[in-house]
Image (tube, rainbow, N blue to C red):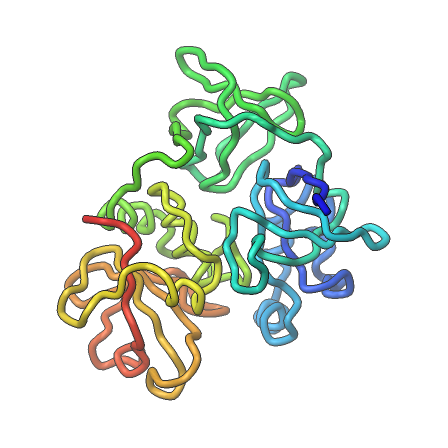
Amino acid sequence: MELTRKTVSATVATLWSNPESARTVDEKAIHNPVDLEGWLDQLSYSSSLALCDENRVQSQVLYGDEVLILEEKNDWSHVIVPSQPSSKDPRGYPGWIPTEQLSEEIYDGDGVYVSIIKHGAAVTNQGDDKMHLSYQTRLPLIDHTIDEYRVWTPHGDSLIKKEHSELVEVNGDVGNGDELVKNAEKFIGLLYLWGGMSSYGYDCSGFSYNMARSIGCTIPRDAHDQMKSGERVQDGNWDVGDLLFFAYEKGKGSVHHVGMYYGDGKMIHSPSTGRIIEITPLKGTIYEEELCGVRRYWGN
């Protein structure tokens, strides 16, 4: 049976584990328009940690991305996210999104997209209403002027300043590891968010996924799936932008973390709840003990 397609119409839609996962403290994250900054500002360390420890959040989906509807329950939709490859479902990443954050408006074209390269860049619709978008939000190109791109959105054709965006071709050339790390540096100091897939907050694999997206490469959503794909890199042959994977039991157990090789024995990564994106050396740290593999998805 062919599944119904819908489009995310909120700046960032959080993908919850089930309709009961959202708490009172999460109220600002489950409406449309969504207030991501307000939600994150009021999360304490313990309520942030519970997003993971209590299995409340799975991932997030950006404005304009497509989802497939599995079922609807009250005000929630059980969806698949095709743009986020996952071993959980061959069709994409599964989870629940508030139905009010979805639109029945669908774009059926292909070709060139406009990608946001500045966090908080505004898209302005025909009524002069503005939405401030996450880094790596992608919207189909309709036309352009000297200073702006006209794009398709779930709210109708809208404008984005060229200085805050770039053109991306579907199945176009993939960039290199140096470009990936340069893009990652923009987010040093950003607070970790479990399930985070936006420039309001990334988790470890959300960070590597979106930096890969920034150079035109789609990789699996989760760290353990990222570890299973890509080109295996032998010790001593690491290059800038390679993905470094870490496992429990001094590298012998299950994969629990991923970072990006920065060069000079360092990595850039989003560590854990309560911490910020950072560049850190590997030698003499727990990361050196837990390193279990290195994968390359792009050339240098």
Q: Residue at x 86, y 53 (%)?
A: 74
Q: Position of residue 153 (x, y in %)?
A: 60, 28
Q: Nearer the viewer, residue 104 or 35?
A: 104
Q: Position of residue 83 (x, y in %)?
A: 52, 47
Q: Residue at x 35, y 55 (%)?
A: 188
Q: Position of residue 117 (x, y in %)?
A: 40, 36
Task: State the residue lying farthest toward the front.
Answer: 1
For residue 207, which quarter of the picture? Answer: bottom left
Can residue 279 be seen in the rendering of this structure? no
Q: Residue at x 18, y 58 (%)?
A: 239
Q: Residue at x 61, y 40 (%)?
A: 66
Q: Nearer the viewer, residue 230 or 159?
A: 230
Above or below 6: residue 297: below
For residue 20, which quarter of the picture? Answer: bottom right
Task: State the residue lying farthest toward the top.
Answer: 145
Above or below 207: residue 286: below
